[in-house]
Image (cartoon, rainbow, N blue to C red):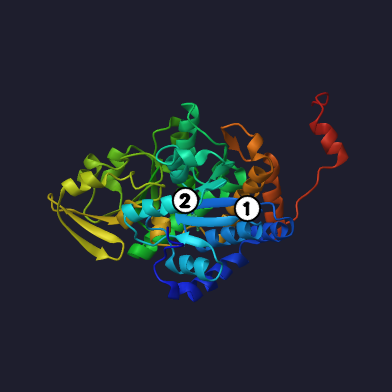
């Protein structure tokens, strides 16, 4: 088994510069790195991480390494790797990395297996691909493991399904569900980076456009509000009545995708589900409609159906493919329907990843301390960790908040006082 697999080692100096740039905006993770250097909570532990290989992830890897962990990193998506970062991780930080932007499916899985060959005590997933293999082809490796962490909504859904069927074989912390993760990363991170990805790929004017957001979870909420902020007329589609109502009362137009398909200029899926935009929707779209996905898997847009409707395809710009339909209309698909924010831009800004990855590092520490005592379940991130991350972030932002007075504490714990 090779020691690493990256595209071009000569990119390392550029990658290092960008990793250090991101570090400046990751003060919470930086403070954990300093603690880890002293305490070495991950000493003698092997960690296999399957994450988007970005500058922010590089800083998480440096933190785990400072804590004493022996790490192997592979990509959690074929298009999200930043090749300069992968090169620098290997060359400057001695972290074995298996990731190349644009790798095909075979290489993607070869890299996943390379990470598992490390015989991890702890896994760190973004989308549950490592844990999924540990419950399939690589079952034997579970013996000796302590547990894992999961970064994203889609991964947590997969793990909860394993847990529900009684099949989950290790404890996992659902980092995605920490408040200091999804309230910021999913909402403000996805909101901004999705717009960033669409603009870098297409350079279209958002102002005055009709922007359709499929899904009103935390990512959809963030994206809809950012698109509105750029002057788009925003339509939200949903399957959940409560979320649809919320979107409506947040001031967005809500309708079915069937209706929205006729109206939209730009479509983005953020649902975590399958075939949200499909044949009947492509057929109803205007000539020139732009379609992108910002959910974890490239299954939200039914690309096989789009191909079946198409008479000719060409690359219109880097990461933008034109599908000329037999009807004469053209549809532009961004980044092969893979998550657009990491494929055509740089993913979420470091400042939000700071909190997400602080949760990752602190959950790894909990696993190291007490993971062997945990049941084979999907666990919430301990409230203490969430509160600590929020406190450290506020400190770093130099924001002070009030303390409850003794009188207020008493009032909050009593029932006698009324009108
Ligand atoms: N997920 C979304 N944005 C990311 C980033 N910048 N780094 C790693 N994972 C991400």
- Which quadrant does the C terminus fall into? top right
Rate crowding at label 2 as few (under 14), some (14 to 19) or many (20 or more) other CA atoms within 10 Å: some
Asked where in the image residue 372 lies, by quadrant, the reply is top right
Rate crowding at label 1 as few (under 14), some (14 to 19) or many (20 or more) other CA atoms within 10 Å: many
The answer, for residue 216, to whether it is visible in the render is: no
From the viewer's perspective, tell me whether residue 27 is left or right of residue 353: right
N-term mark: 1 or 2: 2
Q: SS class of the residue under badge 2?
A: loop
x 73%, y 55%: residue? 39
From the viewer's perspective, tell me whether residue 71 is left or right of residue 130: right
- Which quadrant does the N terminus fall into? bottom left
Q: Nearer the viewer, residue 383 or 419?
A: 383
Q: SS class of the residue under badge 1?
A: helix
Q: Which residue is mark 2?
A: 117
Q: Which residue is mark 1?
A: 358
x 29%, y 40%: residue? 259
Outermost residue on the top side: it is: 416
Q: Nearer the viewer, residue 265 or 373?
A: 373
Coordinates of residue 233 in the picture (x, y in percent): 39, 51
Coordinates of residue 387 in the picture (x, y in percent): 70, 45
């Amino acid at each position: 088994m090779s020691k690493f697999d990256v595209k071009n080692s000569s990119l390392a100096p550029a990658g290092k510069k960008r990793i250090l740039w991101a570090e400046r905006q990751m003060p919470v993770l930086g403070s954990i790195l300093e603690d880890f250097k002293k305490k070495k909570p991950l000493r003698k532990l092997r960690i296999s991480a399957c994450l988007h290989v970005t500058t922010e992830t590089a800083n998480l890897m440096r933190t785990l390494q400072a804590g004493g962990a022996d790490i192997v990193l592979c990509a959690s998506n074929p298009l999200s790797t930043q090749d300069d970062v992968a090169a620098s991780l290997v060359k400057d930080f001695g972290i074995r990395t298996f990731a190349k932007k644009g790798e095909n499916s075979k290489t993607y899985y070869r890299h996943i297996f390379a990470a598992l060959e490390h015989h991890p005590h702890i896994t760190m997933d973004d989308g549950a691909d490592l844990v999924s293999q540990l419950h399939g082809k690589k079952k034997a490796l579970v013996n000796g493991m302590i547990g894992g962490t999961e970064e994203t909504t889609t991964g947590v859904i997969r793990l909860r399904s394993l847990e529900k069927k009684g099949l989950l074989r290790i404890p996992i912390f659902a980092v995605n569900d920490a408040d200091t993760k999804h309230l910021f990363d999913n909402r403000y991170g996805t909101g901004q980076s999705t717009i960033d990805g669409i603009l870098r790929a297409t350079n279209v004017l958002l102002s005055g456009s009709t922007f359709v957001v499929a899904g009103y979870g935390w990512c959809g909420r963030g994206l809809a509000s950012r698109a509105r902020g750029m002057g788009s007329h925003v339509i939200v589609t949903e399957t959940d009545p409560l979320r649809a109502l919320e979107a409506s009362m947040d001031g967005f137009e809500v309708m079915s995708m069937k209706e929205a398909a006729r109206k939209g200029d730009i479509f983005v899926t953020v649902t975590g589900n399958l075939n949200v935009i499909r044949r009947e929707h492509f057929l109803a779209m205007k000539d020139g409609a732009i379609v992108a996905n910002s959910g974890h898997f490239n299954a939200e847009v039914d690309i096989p159906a789009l191909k079946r409707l198409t008479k000719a395809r060409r690359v219109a710009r880097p990461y933008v493919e034109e599908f000329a339909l037999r009807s004469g209309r053209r549809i532009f698909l961004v980044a092969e329907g893979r998550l657009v924010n990491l494929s055509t831009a740089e993913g979420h800004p470091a400042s939000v990843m700071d909190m997400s990855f602080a949760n990752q590092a602190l959950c790894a520490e909990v696993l190291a301390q007490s993971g062997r005592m945990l049941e084979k379940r999907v666990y919430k991130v301990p409230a203490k960790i969430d509160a600590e991350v929020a406190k450290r972030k506020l400190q770093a932002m130099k924001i002070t908040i009030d303390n409850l007075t003794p009188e207020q504490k008493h009032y909050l714990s009593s029932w006698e006082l009324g009108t």
